[in-house]
């Protein structure tokens, strides 16, 4: 038994050390952890930028590399859900390594701002590049991509023009035919907050009530799962973010590509307020050790070079349509977006949450 | 789990050296950290508690109980008969099944669901049919319950090996004596199983089931995948999404209550009866099954293996193949390096501490020692989310009290949480080894005037090589698969294979997520087979 164990132990040791060597050769040496910059000029900042991000697209890595090449600033990332990141920044206090909080929702940026976790950034370049509705009036956060919450429908069972607005989703004629992800999703929460801002809480509550009564099934999965369910005939119309459709069209999973081929999309409320949009945006953390690097990165994200990358890779809309390079977006055509200033979402967020909680969505 | 208090007392007790107290003190400090965080949070004001309260039992506790009880039932159904068949019968494939049945241990629940992700989609035809024939109300009711059924089916299929392993070990110990006696008295296999083996294996079955239930309570990934609101999911939602640590602390307390209830039931199931199963098993001559019975036995073993490993594992491999079409996803190599480095160093740390602790407990056999042994084992009953929450709160508490910046986003927090949760995994084989392998050799050494720590180094350590390797490996494999703690406490700019798979899956990039998943499964399968071999060794 001894010899047996010896042999196993030796073998394990050999495998372990081989793996360890492989890993230490394969991995790039990571830059040293950020240390507080000595008080003084921005030029004294280390060439490091620490992101806490809710975005995790492959294309973002391309942008990070381009930014590093351009400026020599290395980007280090912690990714998690926006809420978790916010509670982490809060918990870490002045020791928090984050320089920039990146989210996929303006509501969360408003929340971080209201919790005192962000600092304002003065940058004429950002003000010029980003439309006022897509950034915080107090300069606490800036949007750099636009995402539209659209209605997808099964081409086989729904005619174009049969559904045109968010209000339709709550119409009893769609009973048992609507697919949507859970009310836990920040995309739904922001849509509801925007409705509260535009139409008041009573009307919004009635809409949410109607919507939940029309559901084809209890909410399950993310936006892509709703599109898959359309293809499987589990429902006829679904509320999804537009870029998911683009990503499914390019998916590595043939089932997703097949599902994409069976659906079409409509931009809701073109005759009303316009389609609800949200942003992917970022704000500089209050205790950022590299605030100047963070500002430079924001300016980079708003620059034409970066803006052209988003529609081509993640299928999000750029902040200025002139940079839109996506053939799919051209096919879908231009749309009218709701002009509500997204910094208003934060204000109406508690009311929206209360409505959602009450409906059990 | 083995009861530390059952240790036979040494005939002549040597006084415990001061160093033993240092180790016990260190353990107390490690455990004080989470407790100091969790206890005050229980009484702190909570923003969401009022809104949460009505759903506490109707949602969180209900989902938790359905998931655990359902999984426990299935784990019994899969684990016990297969253990019996592979131990006492010969049928086509029986030797193969005896080791292959442990393979699902390699698939943690959160990865197994990847393999089954499209099952609901495949059932869509049925849904459409039901909707057409029964109307949408009943159809969606069925669909909702189908989720529970799927979750329970998947978790039961991957967790039955806990029952299988403990039960099989028990059957093997009984084998030579009682089972053969029963055969000689003319009992058939079935009747021996029902009347002799099963009642005698009851403690082992209860122990294995308790382990499987702990795993269900620990799970976050799988329940989240199916949108179930278990207590662990609630701790994530309230403690980290809504940043209401007080509400999460109360949910933790309730969850620990569930754990204690299960452990209490396990104790009761063991009963006061003490079965002496005999120490060294003599291989028994197995029943040779023939004809339909033999094929039925093969099928009974094949079903759990297929459902718990081959089907989901194969599907994950297939998806990983799709996902690697354009090469490995970014961040794969660093994640692999981080995983090996983190799991390796944490396993070394935990095993060393467990060794010192097991030895200190051996030296200090009084109440403090017994308490320490219990405390070391208790961590494993604490679900990862609870440990992570408690450590987070403890670190916040420390930094507020002393102004230290030992924050949750550092390795300190991660290692502390790992230590609390996985100490038992290392402690168990080492404590066992100290008793079995070393006997009273170290007492003899100390009687000859050699100091206790020198004795540990010179006498015990060389003898303990086997248990030490077991402790290291078991802990390493558990750390490799660990998700909830790593997810909540990982430092900045750091991801492991498990968190990478999780991140990719959360972005609906399942094919890419299956690559790190496949590596975890491969390493986990190697570990599971090794564990099986070491358990089977006479």
Image (cartoon, rainbow, N blue to C red):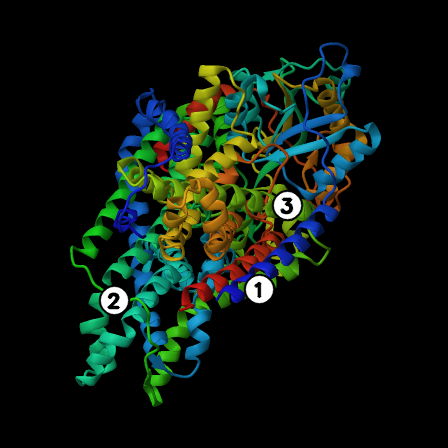
What is the chain letter for disc 3? B
Do tags 2 and 1 sit on the same chain?
no
Within-10-Å neighbours for mark 2: few <14, some 14–19, many 20+: some
Question: Of B262 and B134, which appears nearest the observer?
Answer: B262
Alpha-carbon distance for marks 3 and 2? 46 Å
Task: Mark 3 vs mark 2: give the one in front.
Answer: 2
Asked if the residue at tag 3 contacts the one at tag 1, i.e. Cβ–Cβ closer than 8 Å, the answer is no
**Which quadrant of the figure has residue A330?**
top right
Q: Which residue is mark 3?
A: B335
Q: Residue furthest toward the bottom?
A: B291
Q: Which residue is mark 1?
A: A7
Q: Which residue is mark 2?
A: B277
Q: Is residue B324 above or below residue B50?
A: below
Q: Secondary structure at mark 3?
A: helix
Q: Residue at x 36, y 65 (%)?
A: B164
Q: Secondary structure at mark 1?
A: helix
Q: Earlier in the sequence, mark 3 or mark 2?
A: 2
């Amino acid at each position: 038994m001894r010899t047996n164990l010896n042999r196993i132990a030796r073998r394990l040791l050999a495998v372990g050390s081989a793996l360890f060597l492989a890993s230490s050769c394969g991995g790039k040496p990571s830059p040293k952890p950020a240390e507080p910059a000595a008080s003084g000029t921005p030029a004294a900042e280390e060439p490091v930028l620490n992101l806490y991000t809710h975005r995790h697209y492959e294309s973002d890595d391309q942008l990070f590399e381009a930014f590093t090449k351009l400026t020599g600033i290395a980007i280090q990332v912690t990714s998690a859900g926006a809420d978790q990141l916010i509670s982490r920044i809060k918990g870490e206090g002045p020791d928090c390594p984050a320089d920039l909080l990146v989210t996929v929702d303006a509501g969360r940026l408003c929340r971080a701002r209201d919790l005192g976790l962000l600092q304002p950034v003065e940058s004429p370049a950002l003000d010029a590049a980003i439309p006022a509705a897509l950034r915080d009036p107090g300069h606490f956060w800036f949007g750099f991509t636009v995402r539209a919450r659209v209605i997808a429908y099964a081409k086989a069972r729904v005619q174009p023009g049969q559904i045109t607005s968010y209000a339709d989703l709550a119409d009893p004629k769609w009973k048992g035919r609507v697919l949507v992800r859970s009310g836990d999703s920040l995309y739904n929460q922001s849509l509801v907050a925007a409705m509260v801002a535009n139409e008041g809480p009573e009307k919004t509550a009635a809409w949410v009530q109607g919507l939940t009564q029309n559901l084809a099934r209890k909410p399950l999965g993310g936006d892509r799962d709703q599109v898959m369910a359309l293809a499987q005939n589990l429902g006829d119309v679904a509320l999804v973010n537009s870029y998911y459709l683009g990503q499914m069209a390019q998916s590595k999973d043939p089932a997703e590509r097949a599902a994409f081929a069976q659906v079409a999309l409509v931009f809701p409320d073109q005759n009303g307020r316009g389609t609800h949009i949200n942003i992917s945006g970022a704000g500089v953390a209050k205790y950022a050790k590299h605030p100047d690097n963070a500002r430079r990165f924001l300016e980079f994200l708003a620059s034409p070079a970066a803006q052209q990358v988003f529609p081509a890779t993640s299928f999000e809309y750029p902040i200025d349509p002139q940079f839109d390079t996506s053939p799919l977006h051209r096919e879908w055509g231009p749309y009218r977006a709701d002009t509500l200033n997204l910094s208003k979402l934060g204000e109406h967020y508690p009311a929206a949450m209360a409505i959602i909680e009450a409906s059990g969505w | 789990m083995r009861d530390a208090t059952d240790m036979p007392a040494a005939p002549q007790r040597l006084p415990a050296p001061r160093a033993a107290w240092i180790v016990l003190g260190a353990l107390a400090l490690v455990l004080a950290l989470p407790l100091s965080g969790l206890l005050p949070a229980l009484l702190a004001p909570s923003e969401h508690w009022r809104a949460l309260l009505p759903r506490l039992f109707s949602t969180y506790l209900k989902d938790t109980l359905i998931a655990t009880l359902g999984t426990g039932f299935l784990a019994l159904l899969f684990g016990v008969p297969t253990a019996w068949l592979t131990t006492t019968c010969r049928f086509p494939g029986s030797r193969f099944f005896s080791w292959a049945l442990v393979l699902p241990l390699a698939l943690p629940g959160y990865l197994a669901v990847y393999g089954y992700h499209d099952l609901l989609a495949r059932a869509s035809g049925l849904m459409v049919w039901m909707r057409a024939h029964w109307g949408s109300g009943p159809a969606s009711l069925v669909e909702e319950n189908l989720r529970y059924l799927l979750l329970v089916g998947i978790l039961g299929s991957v967790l039955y090996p806990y029952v299988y392993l403990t039960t099989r070990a028990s059957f093997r110990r009984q084998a030579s004596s009682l089972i053969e006696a029963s055969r000689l008295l003319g009992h058939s296999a079935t009747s021996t199983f029902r009347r002799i083996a099963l009642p005698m294996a009851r403690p082992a079955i209860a122990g294995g089931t308790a382990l499987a239930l702990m795993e269900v309570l620990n799970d976050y990934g799988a329940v989240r995948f199916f949108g179930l609101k278990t207590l662990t999911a609630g701790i994530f939602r309230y403690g980290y999404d809504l940043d209401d640590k007080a509400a999460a602390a109360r949910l933790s307390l309730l969850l620990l209550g569930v754990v204690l209830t299960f452990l209490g039931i396990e104790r009761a199931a063991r009963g006061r009866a003490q079965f002496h199963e005999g120490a060294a098993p003599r291989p028994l001559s197995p029943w040779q099954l023939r004809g339909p019975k033999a094929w039925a036995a093969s099928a009974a073993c094949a079903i759990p293996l297929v459902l718990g490993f081959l089907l989901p594992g194969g599907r994950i491999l297939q998806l990983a193949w799709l996902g690697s079409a354009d090469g490995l996803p970014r961040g794969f190599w660093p994640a692999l390096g981080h995983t090996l480095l983190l799991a390796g160093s944490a396993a070394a740390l935990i095993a060393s501490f467990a060794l010192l602790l097991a030895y200190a407990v051996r030296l200090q056999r009084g109440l403090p020692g017994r308490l320490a042994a219990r405390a070391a084992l208790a961590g494993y009953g604490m679900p990862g989310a609870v440990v992570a929450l408690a450590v987070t709160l403890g670190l916040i508490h420390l930094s507020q009290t002393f102004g230290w910046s030992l924050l949750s986003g550092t390795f300190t927090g991660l290692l502390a949480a790992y230590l609390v949760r996985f100490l038992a995994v290392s402690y168990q084989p080492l404590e066992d080894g100290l008793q079995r392998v070393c006997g009273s050799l170290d007492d003899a050494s100390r009687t000859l005037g050699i100091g206790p720590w020198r004795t540990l180094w010179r006498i015990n350590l060389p003898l303990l090589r086997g248990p030490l390797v077991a402790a290291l490996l078991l802990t390493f494999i558990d750390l490799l698969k660990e998700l909830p703690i790593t997810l909540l406490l990982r430092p900045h700019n750091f991801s492991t294979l498990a968190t990478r798979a999780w991140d990719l899956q959360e972005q609906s990039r399942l094919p890419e997520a299956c690559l790190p998943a496949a590596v975890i499964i491969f390493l986990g399968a190697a570990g599971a087979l090794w564990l099986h071999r070491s358990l089977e060794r006479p």
